[in-house]
Image (cartoon, rainbow, N blue to C red):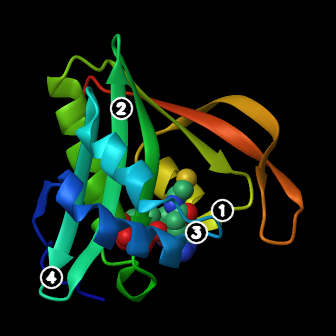
Amino acid sequence: MTRAPQRPVRLAAPRDAQALAALHARAFDHPWLVTAIADLLAGEGVIGLMAEDSTGPLGFVLARVVAGEAEILTIAVDPNHRRSGLGQALLAAASDLATQQGGEALFLEVSVDNQAALALYEKAGFVRVGLRRGYYTGADGRTVDALVLRRNLNKPL
Ligand SMILES: CC(C)(COP(=O)(O)OP(=O)(O)OC[C@H]1O[C@@H](n2cnc3c(N)ncnc32)[C@H](O)[C@@H]1OP(=O)(O)O)[C@@H](O)C(=O)NCCC(=O)NCCS
């Protein structure tokens, strides 16, 4: 299958928070508040990137860089636009920006049962460096372990 041309990724600003919160709610069981996203986007060291079309955001990523370590806070692609390379493009753009801001390694947490995200991160070269037991609580109240993954930022994705 031929992929659609990649949509450009742009910086997200606090004014995008409402639309990003709506997208977040379509992607996760536990939506984030608009104010929480706006505060993060206004925060020092926080990277916010999004892809959009005329209907609004199609995907976004929030990351933070502190003392040489970068962390993905969240990444989400609209369910109707998955498997077209957006997640990978957002991850690559966040990695580039984190590197420019002094990040040497990128960390994230991912549920052990999130097959799509695990496949994305494996393809991007992340390796497992830890396990957090019972880290997530699903919509049904069941707890799920999280893997801690790491990727060196010394080469572009
Ligand atoms: C995880 C997520 C961001 C991936 O976004 P995406 O835009 O669909 O990912 P991409 O199209 O860039 O996929 C890149 C690669 O990741 C892997 N991948 C992504 N989704 C996959 C799936 N459902 N099954 C298997 N592999 C998958 C594939 O290797 C894919 O490359 P390919 O399409 O050439 O085979 C998206 O599924 C999502 O928003 N999920 C809900 C929110 C979430 O779980 N976020 C991560 C929290 S840690």
Say if residue 137 shows up in the picture: yes
**Residues under numbered marks 3 and 4 in contact, where contact means CB atoms less than 8 Å apart:** no
Percent of width and height locating residue 59: 32, 68
Q: Which residue is mark 2?
A: 64
Disc with the residue nearer the chain's start (3 vs 1): 3
**Residues under numbered marks 2 and 4 in contact, where contact means CB atoms less than 8 Å apart:** no
**Is residue 128 found left or right of 25 in the rendered image?**
right
**Dot 3 amino acid type:** Phe
Q: Which residue is mark 4?
A: 53
Q: Secondary structure at mark 3?
A: loop
Residue 141, above or below 90? below
In the drawing, what numbered circle is on residue 114? 1
**Residues under numbered marks 3 and 2 in contact, where contact means CB atoms less than 8 Å apart:** no
Disc with the residue nearer the chain's start (1 vs 2): 2
Q: CA distance from mark 2 to mark 4?
A: 25 Å
**Is residue 24 found left or right of 39 in the rendered image?**
right
In the drawing, what numbered circle is on residue 47? none
Q: Nearer the viewer, mark 1 or mark 4?
A: 4
The answer to whether the residue bearing label 3 lies less than 8 angstroms from the nearest atom of ligand 1 is: yes
Identify the residue at the far right of this view. Answer: 142
In the drawing, what numbered circle is on residue 28? 3
Q: Which of the two residues, 120 or 144, is positioned nearer the viewer here? A: 144
**Dot 4 amino acid type:** Asp
